């Protein structure tokens, strides 16, 4: 998740950024919570814990945690006007790490895993340290509020669909060797760092460290240029391509301010953008959040220059002639057909036709690329039709595994994009084959 459209910069393992001196073990800053949280464990649910923490934060408007098509989400029971503040979450309720001097900020608690990790290696990245903070919270060794939140509000381990949390037999089902290889490397690295946390939480589920790391990777926020935080309440908000809420960090009040960027109707879901204006590809969405856009992702791209040796620039005028000026062209250029739009943006198109390659070179390039695509589709280990049929059966099942649903959606969207590119190349190939002009 990110702030104001700037991507959350994942700190890779071995990044070498050591914790500054004011972060040393003996000077971990403990933030006093605004009030104590009192509730009987027998009375707690995800919804009630969310309500308790919102009350502790001094929520601006009535919000509630409720089920949605994307799992649980945040909803409002009142109408919210654009610019209105929904909540101000004190940094004292969060876990955060600021490399520019703010320090490692934790609510009052013992935090033994975090302390031991810093003592052992002060170059551990922020996401690993916050993952240890999640585990300390779950075991009751952090703050009382975060203990309730991590145990009741965070997702069930076997619903975590990030590749680093998937068992190997599900990683194979992604049908993406590169993503599988990176996930296995990440699993191996996490286990080597903390062998004692490398056991499964339950059969066929993630290890303790994989789960906590996955929670941080998918739910943490960038609060500043070099500041990262696990922010309860806000982290429960789902993603939308057109969100109605954003947030900012208020350093003077040490709060994370959640505010409406559009009018929100009574009963409507409160959503944020995980990607900002820059957008993420489906590969990154799957790797970081464990889901993809089910209607196609306009930010997806193919690296066609790595797939074909021939270099070429296609003339935009020829592309327009090939597609015509009908509904198909409008849908592609507007992004309504997200798969074809992403394919079009992947091609080496020259806006000024006089700067494009000669038409015979364009023709040869499209033909070569079409052959590459036929081979790519021919290498599928299952057909798109079979994948879609399997997805339908899983949706109809009473015992569907959300992880398998996410995996299937990922590979279905990848194949639909392959099909869209093949369709686009067929149209271009037919156009160039019918063109007898050797002029640009």
Image (spheres, grey):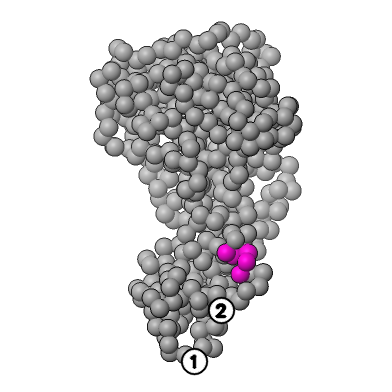
Q: Secondary structure at mark 2?
A: helix
Tell me if 269 is positioned left or right of 322 in this view.
right
Q: Position of residue 428 (x, y in %)?
A: 53, 78
Most frequent secondary structure within the magenta stretch: helix
Q: Is residue 371 magenta?
A: no
Q: Secondary structure at mark 1?
A: loop
Q: Is residue 332 magenta?
A: yes
| Magenta segment boundaries in residue numbering | 329-333
Q: Give yes or no for contact between labels 1 and 2 (Cβ–Cβ under 8 Å).
A: no
Residue 113 lies in what quarter of the image?
Answer: top left
Q: Position of residue 330 (x, y in %)?
A: 62, 66
Q: Is residue 132 above or below residue 292?
A: above
Q: Residue at x 50, y 78 (%)?
A: 318
User: Which disc, if any, is residue 321?
Assistant: 2
- Say which residue label 1 marks: 436
Q: Position of residue 303 (x, y in %)?
A: 41, 63
């Amino acid at each position: 998740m990110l702030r104001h459209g700037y991507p959350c910069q994942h700190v890779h393992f071995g990044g070498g950024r050591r914790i500054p001196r004011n972060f040393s073990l003996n000077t971990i800053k403990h933030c006093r919570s605004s009030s104590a949280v009192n509730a009987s464990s027998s009375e707690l649910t995800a919804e009630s814990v969310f309500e308790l923490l919102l009350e502790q934060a001094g929520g601006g408007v009535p919000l509630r945690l409720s089920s949605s098509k994307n799992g649980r989400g945040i909803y409002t029971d009142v109408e919210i006007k654009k610019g209105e503040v929904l909540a101000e979450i004190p940094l004292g309720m969060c876990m955060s790490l600021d490399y520019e001097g703010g320090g490692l900020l934790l609510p009052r608690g013992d935090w033994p895993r975090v302390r031991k990790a810093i003592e052992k290696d002060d170059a551990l990245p922020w996401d690993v340290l916050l993952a240890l903070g999640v585990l300390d919270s779950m075991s009751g060794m952090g703050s009382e509020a975060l203990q309730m939140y991590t145990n009741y509000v965070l997702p069930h381990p076997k619903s975590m669909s990030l590749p680093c949390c998937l068992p190997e037999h599900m990683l194979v089902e992604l049908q993406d060797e590169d993503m599988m290889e990176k996930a296995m490397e990440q699993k191996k690295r996490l286990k080597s760092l903390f062998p004692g946390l490398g056991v499964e939480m339950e059969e066929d589920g993630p290890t303790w460290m994989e789960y906590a790391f996955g929670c941080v990777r998918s739910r943490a926020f960038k609060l500043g240029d070099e500041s990262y935080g696990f922010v309860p309440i806000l982290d429960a908000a789902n993603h939308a391509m057109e969100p109605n809420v954003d947030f900012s960090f208020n350093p003077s009040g040490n709060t994370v301010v959640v505010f409406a960027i559009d009018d929100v109707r009574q009963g409507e879901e409160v959503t944020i953008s995980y990607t900002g204006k820059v957008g993420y590809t489906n590969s990154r969405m799957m790797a970081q959040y464990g889901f993809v856009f089910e209607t196609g992702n306009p930010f997806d791209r193919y690296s066609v220059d790595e797939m074909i040796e021939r270099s070429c620039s296609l003339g935009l005028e020829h592309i327009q002639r090939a597609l015509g000026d009908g509904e198909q062209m409008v849908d592609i250029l507007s992004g309504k057909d997200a798969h074809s739009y992403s394919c079009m943006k992947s091609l080496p198109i020259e806006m000024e036709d006089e700067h494009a390659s000669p038409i015979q070179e364009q023709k040869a390039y499209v033909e070569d690329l079409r052959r590459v695509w036929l081979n790519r589709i021919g290498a599928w280990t299952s057909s798109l039709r079979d994948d879609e049929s399997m997805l339908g059966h899983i949706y109809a099942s009473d015992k569907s595994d959300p992880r398998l649903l996410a995996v299937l959606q990922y590979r279905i969207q990848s194949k639909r994009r392959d099909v869209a590119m093949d369709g686009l190349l067929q149209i271009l190939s037919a156009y160039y084959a019918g063109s007898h002009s050797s002029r640009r």
